[in-house]
Each structure stands twice: as C-alpha cells, then as structure tokens.
Image (cartoon, helix red, strand yellow):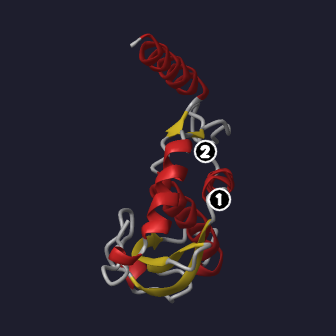
Amino acid sequence: MTICPHHTQQNKNLFAALAKAQAEAKYVKKDKPSNFGDKPYAASEDIINDCKEHLNAHGISLLPLSFSASPCDVIAGATESDAKTSWLKRPIMLSRYFKLCHESGEFEILGPYDWPTNPNNMNTNFTAFGGTDTFSLAYVYRDILGMPRLTPQEVKQFELEEQKMKQALAVA
C-alpha cells in the first residue's frame, strides 16, 4: 500500500482504528471450487465483503477515487499483434487511487495501484475492466488488513495454532 505522505502525521484516529481492524481480521477463506484444477479460491466479492465488515466495525471505509487506463505493451502472455489491435482488444494498464476514510474525518490517499487487463478472444476491454476493477478492489482491501487467503485445511491449522498460543499465554 502506498500512502501519500502529506497526511501521515495527522491521522492518529484512523491508524488506531486500522490497527484494531487488522488485529481482528484473521483470514479470508478459500472455499470456492476452481474451474482450473482442484485448488479452491477466495472469490473477490467474498474478500471485499469480509474486509468491509472489519473496517466498517471501526469506522473506516474505502472509497475508489479515480482510475486511468493506458495502453500496456508489456503483459505476460501478450503478443506483438496485441499491441497493434484496436483498444477494445489491446492490453491495458488500469491505475487506481483510493481514499481510506475514518469517521473522525481523517483520511489517507492510497495509490497508485496498477493492474493489467488483457482481454482474451471472448472479451473486450469493456468486460475485462469490470473483472479487473473487482479483482483489484478485493486485493486492496486484503492488503489494507493484511489478510491471507486460507483453504479450509489451513483455517483448521491456523485456529489450532491460535488456540495453543492462547493457552500458552494463559499459563504464563
């Protein structure tokens, strides 16, 4: 996360609330079946909803401010012919800025976050932008809270280790 430096010293309430939200936010479950193998994934919508709950509980919200799109000639899987096609099918870099707001009125500007979109033969940039927009928003939320994505088996292991740690602290 990139924080613009002009507000950093003034936002004690925002950062205190963010620290509390981060302490409570443990993980996002990867529990959706994948079409590309046997590994489950965490849906972007689930990540967004989980993270919003943790932030909103502490008076924090995330607002998309702006985005820009520019031609991108360097994307994994893009070909030289992609760069010569119409902008509807050409690889595009989506750059976004966000505003992290606290109920006290304090805020931070975050960004830029750069996300490539490379429409395949089935999509144009109109539909690819929507997917990239949602996907990038999910990752910004997850980055703010530092929430890992865990499979159901990893969740069990995480909770077992957390319980052991609490027991050890109670004995000490």
x then y, percent, for residue 133: 58, 71
Residue type at numbered disc 2: Ala
x then y, percent, for residue 160: 53, 17
Q: According to the image, label 1 marks what residue?
A: 52
Q: According to the image, label 2 marks what residue?
A: 42
- Residue 153 visible: yes
Q: Residue 96, relative to residue 2: is it above or below?
A: below
- Residue 91 visible: no
Residue type at numbered disc 1: Lys
Q: Nearer the viewer, residue 62 or 87?
A: 62
Category of crowding for the residue at label 1, using alpha-carbon neighbours closer than 10 angstroms: few (below 14), some (14–19), many (at least 20): some
- From mark 2 to mark 1, how far is it between C-alphas? 15 Å
x then y, percent, for residue 88: 56, 85
SS of the residue at dot 2?
loop
SS of the residue at dot 1?
helix
Seen at 35% across and 71% down, the residue is: 2
